[in-house]
């Protein structure tokens, strides 16, 4: 009887040790996922900071060139609509990424149009704003890369075995990366003819 009880207790302790080890592993993986998720949130907050700087510069730039470019009201309207959409995006990073890409697309059209107005290039206010905007665009690029790096690390952890078995149950899923806007490699065409 004693031998059977000892075997039972040893087996029970073995099972408890395995359960404790498995529990410690899951807790460790959970903590790693929380850290990686927090890193992506921080990186996205940095992206939003420089995007906000861009959004703050755009109205000043638009105001500086509006008088000269009265016929380009659609571009100004597109920029305003895209900024509003970004400010109202509350459903997570995917919606904000899409809205930021719309702003970028509209801003690209504005910059192409501005290239066709020599009098704007000689305006000191416009030149200063363009320089600031150019610096901000560089910062946005760097912060987007950092964000994408953080997302890649997080997504890799979420998708790899064995973490993939319980990541979803713990409330973790893949995050959205910043990607180039559709047709980003196509130079926009601008028709400045007045009908």
Image: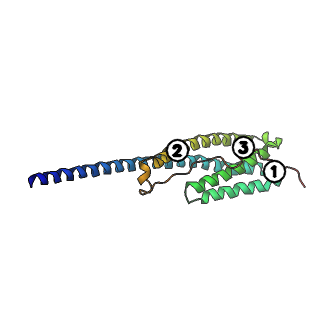
Residue 52 image offset from top left, x and y in percent: 60, 50
Instruction: From the image, state whether disc 1 or disc 3 is nearer to you.
Output: 3
Q: Answer with left or right where residue 189 lies relative to residue 23.
A: right
Write down the residue under mark 1: 69
Write down the residue under mark 3: 185
CA gap between label 2 and label 3 equals: 24 Å
Q: Answer with left or right where residue 162 lies relative to residue 149.
A: left
Nearer-N-terminus badge (1/2): 1
Question: Crowding at label 3, few (<14), some or many (≥20) Cα neighbours within 10 Å?
Answer: few
Nearer-N-terminus badge (2/3): 2
Residue 141 image offset from top left, x and y in percent: 61, 41
What is the residue that sits farthest to the right in this orientation?
Answer: 195
Quadrant of the drawing holding the N terminus: bottom left
SS for dot 2: helix
Write down the residue under mark 2: 152
SS for dot 3: loop
């Amino acid at each position: 009887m004693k031998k059977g009880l000892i075997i039972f207790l040893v087996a029970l302790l073995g099972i408890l040790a395995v359960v404790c080890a498995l529990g410690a592993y899951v807790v460790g993986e959970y903590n790693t996922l929380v850290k990686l998720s927090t890193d992506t949130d921080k990186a996205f907050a940095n992206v939003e900071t420089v995007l906000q700087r861009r959004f703050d510069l755009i109205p000043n730039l638009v105001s500086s060139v509006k008088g000269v470019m009265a016929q380009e009201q659609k571009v100004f309207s597109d920029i305003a609509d895209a900024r509003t959409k970004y400010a109202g995006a509350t459903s997570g990073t995917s919606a904000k990424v899409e809205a930021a890409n719309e702003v970028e697309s509209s801003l690209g059209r504005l910059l192409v149009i501005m290239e066709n107005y020599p009098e704007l290039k000689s305006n000191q206010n416009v030149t200063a704003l363009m320089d600031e905007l150019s610096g901000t665009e560089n910062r946005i690029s760097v912060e987007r890369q950092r964000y994408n790096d953080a997302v890649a690390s997080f997504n890799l952890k979420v998708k790899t075995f064995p973490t993939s078995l319980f990541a979803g149950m713990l409330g973790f899923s893949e995050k959205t990366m910043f990607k180039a806007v559709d047709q980003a490699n196509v130079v926009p065409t601008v028709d400045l003819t007045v009908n």
